[in-house]
Amino acid sequence: MSWDYLFIQAANGAVIGIIYALIAVGVTLIFSILKIVNFAHGDLYMLGGYCAYYVITLFGVPPLPAMFVSMAALFTIAIILERLLLTPLYSDATERKDEYGLIVTFGLAFFLRNIAIIAFGPFPLKPPSFISGVQHFGNLIVTNDRLFAGSAGIVLILALLYFMHRTIWGQALDAVSQSREAAAIVGINPRRFNSFAFGVGAALAAAAGALIAPIFSLAPDMGVLPNIQAYVIVILGGMGSVLGSIIAGIALGESEGLFTAFFPDPTRALAYTNAFGVLVLMIVLIFRPNGLFGRRHLRME
Amino acid sequence: MSENGILIEGSRVTKRFGGITANDGVDFAVAEGDLVGLIGPNGSGKTTLINVLTGHLTPDGGKVILRGRQVSGKPAHIYAATGVARTFQLTQLFGRMTVLENLMVPGLTRPRSSAHEVARRARACLEFLNLAHLEQLYAKNLSGGQQKLLELGRCLMLDPAILFLDEPFAGVHPHLRDELIKRIEELHRAGRTFVVVDHDMESILRISRRLVVMARGRKIADGPPEAVRTDQAVLAAYAGL
Amino acid sequence: MRHLHVYILLAVAVLALAYAPRVNPYWMHVAIIAMFYGILASSWSLLAGYAGLFSLGHMAFASIGGYASALLVQWYGIPIPLGMAAGVALCCALGGLIGWVCLRMSGPYLAIFTLGFAEIVRITFSTEDDITAGMAGLHTEPLFRAATRLPYFYTAFGLLVVSLALMGAIVQSRWGLFLRAIREDEQAAAASGIDVARFRILAFAIASGFAGLAGGFYGHYIGILTPSLGGLDLMAVLVVMAVIGGMERLPTAVGGAFAVEFLLELLREYGQWRLPIFGVILLLTMRFARNGLLTPFWLHFVRLGGGARGAAAVVAPGRKDSRA
C-alpha cells in the first residue's frame, strides 16, 4: 500500500465526512425542535439529489443553481410533509409521541423510496460535474467534484452557523429548541418553527444529495446508509453541536476511508465499510443508550 | 430484621448528576413502624434520596441497607420484592391498562400468587380507596386525585413494609387530601412504615412522627416535628431560599 | 352465545382446511406467504405492541433463521425440522443477546440500534458469498418432495396456529400483563416488582424465535434465500401489516398481514405502485386510526362471544376468556 493511496483515501474521507455532517446537522436541527428522530432524512437527501439531476438535465440549468433549486424544492416539500403528517406531535391529545414520530417517519421513508423507484427508475443516474477535471497535488489526484463538494459543504454549514447565531430567525429557532413554553411566552409561535426547522433540515440534506450526485451515482436507496451515518455523527459530535458534527463527520469519513484502505480483503472492503459505520453506531449506543441527542429521556431529578 | 428495629437505612449516600451533588453524604434511617416526613426546599435532594432508597438510582457513594442486607446497586424490583413500595412525584401509572390491571400487576409479581387471590385482593383494595366503580376504566382517564389514590393502591398490592410517597398531596383537591391522610393514618396504625415527601407543611405536620429536613443535598435536621419546627438551621434554610 | 367468536374462528379454520385441496396453486402460494407474514406480524406485535420494544430487526431474525436452517441442512445433512429447530434456537439466543445489549435503550434509540443490527446482518449475508451465495441466492432443500403445495399449506397453517396459541397463552398470562406494564412505564413496572430486564430479554428472545421459525419455513418452502429477506423494505412491509391491522393485538396483526398480502396480489396490475400505496395507507392509519383499521372489527367480533374488552385471562379470573 502506498502513501499516495492512503492520502487519496484520506482526502475522499474528508469530503464524504463533510457531506455526512451536512445530513447530520439537519437530523440534529429537526430533533432539537420537533423532538423526533427523523427516519426519512436519508430519503430527503435522495430526493434532493434527484431533484438537482432533473433540473440540470431537463432545463439545462448549471449544477450550482440546480443545487439551490433543489434546496428550495425540498424545503417546500418538507414543509408540506410536516404539515400533513407531523402536526399531531404538537397536540396534547396525541399519546405515545415517540412511537408516532417513529412509525410515521419510517413509513414516510418507505413511501419516498418506493415512489422514487417508480419516478426515477431503479438504475443509477449520474448528473454532470459541477466542475469537471482533476487537481494534482504532487502525486495526488483529486477530482474537482470532490473538492467542490467539500468546500460547498463547508460553506453551507458556515452559512447555517451564521444564520443560527446572527439572524433573528436563527435566534428564535434556538429559543424554541431550548424551551417551547418560554419561546411561546415571548411571542414566538413554536408551530411555525417546527415547519421551518424541518424545511431547513431537508434543504441541507438536499444540498448534500446534489453535491454527492456527480461523485457517486443517484439511486432510490442511496439514503439508507447516510441516514445511519448521520446518527453516528450526531452521537459522536456531542449532542446537537454543529461544530462537533463537522468534526465527527470528517472523523467518520476518514475512519471509513482508512478502514477501506486497510481491510485485508479488498473485494469485501467496500461492503464492510458500510457495516463499519453501522457498527460504530451500535457500539456508541450501547455506551450512551439515550445519548444521541441529549437528555430528553432523563426523568429522574 | 435487624435487631435495632431499623427497616431501611441509607448510609453516607452521595449522588451526583454532572456537576451537581444532589445528595452529599446523607445518613437516613427509618425504624419499623415510623411515619417520617421528609421536607426541604426545591432541589434539596429529597426525590434523589427516595430514588436511591428504592433502588431507582445507584448511589455514587455510601450504601443502602434493607433489613440488615446491603442492597445498593441491585435493581428496583428487588427492593419491591423485599417490601419497599413507592409512588412517584408525577404520578406514573400504567396509563393504557385498566384500573384493576394496574393493581393486578404488583400482586402477580409475588411468587406463588394466584390470579384469583390477587384479583380478590385488588378489588378489596379498590373498595378501600373508593375506586371500585372505576375498575374497568383505563388509568389514564382518571382524575389527578384518583390517579394518586390508585398509585397508593398499587403500592399496597405489594403488601409492603415501608411506603415512600413522593409528594402525595401535590395538586390534590383538599377534600381528597383529607381522604388520603385518613388512609395513610389507617395504614400506619395497621403497622406499615411511611416516608412522606411533600411541600404541604400543614399535612406533613399533621401526620409525621418524625421530621427530616434537607437542604442543598444534606440533611440539616432530624427529630420530633415540634423540635424541628423551631430549629435555627431549618429556618435559615427556608429563609435563605 | 358464549364464545361465539371462538366457534366462528374454528369453523372458518375447518372450512379453510377442507377447501384447501381445491384452491388453485397460485392462491395457495399467496395463502402460504400470508401465513408466513402472519407469524412474523404477530411475533413483532408481541415485541413492539405489547412490550413497546419497537425493533426494526425482526426480519433480520427471519433471515438468520432461514439461512441457519438451510446451511445446517446443506452442510450436515440433518433433517429439515431439526435444522429449523436449530434456527429457532439460534434466533432465541441472538434475540436474547440483542435484548440484553439494548436494555437501557428506549423508543427511537432501540429502533436505530436494531436497524443497525439488521443492516449488518444483511451486509454480512450478501458479502460472505462463499458461504451464503450472496445476492445470487442460496438454494435450499425443499421441505416436501410433493407435486402440490398442499403439504406446505397445511404446515404453514399448523405453524401459524401453534405460534398464535403459544403467543396467545403468553399475552393472556401474567407475562403479557407485565410486558404491557413495561411498555407503559418501565420505572413504575420495576417499582411494582417486575424484573424489567428479564422480561425485556424474554420478549426479544421469544419474538425472535418465532421470526426464526417463520424464516426457516420460508427458506425451505420457497427454495432460495437472498439477503434482501432481512432488508429494510420487507421490514417496512411488516410494519405496514402490523400497524394497519393493529399492532397491539395478535389477531389484528395477523389480520393485517393477511389483508396486505392478499391486497398486494389482487392489486398486481398496479405493479410498483402497490408499495407506495401501502405506505400512504400506513401514514393515514397512523394519522387517523392509531389503533389499527381492524381493531374495531375485532373488538365487535369478540363481543359476539361475550368476551371482555381486551382483558387478559389473568385479569378476569372466573370469566373464561379463551381469545387466542
Image: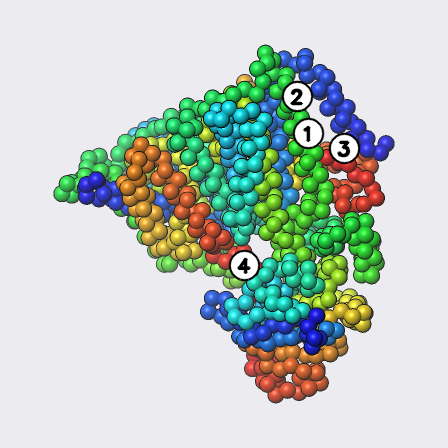
**Pointers 2 and 1 in contact (C-beta within 8 Å):** no
Nearer the N terminus, badge 1 or badge 3? 1
What percent of the width, then of the height, locates residue A108? 51, 37
Q: Which residue type carries mark 4?
A: Leu
Residue denoted by label 4:
A298
- Looking at the rendered image, the quarter that the C terminus of chain B falls into is bottom right
Query: Which residue is pictured at 56% across the width and 25% down the height?
Result: C80
Query: Which residue is pictured at 61% across the width and 20% down the height?
Result: C152
Nearer the N terminus, badge 3 or badge 2? 2
Q: CA distance from mark 4 to mark 3?
A: 42 Å
Label 1's element?
helix
Residue denoted by label 2:
C154
Q: CA distance from mark 4 to mark 2?
A: 50 Å
> Does label 3 lie on the same chain as label 1?
yes
What percent of the width, then of the height, locates residue C5? 78, 31
User: Can residue A178 be spotted in the picture?
Assistant: yes
Q: Chain of mark 3?
A: C
What percent of the width, then of the height, locates residue C169? 71, 39
Q: Chain of mark 4?
A: A
- Residue B131 placement: quadrant: bottom right
Select label 1 or label 3 by which is in front: 1
What percent of the width, then of the height, locates residue C194? 66, 54
**The residue positioned farthest toward the right in the image shown:** C1
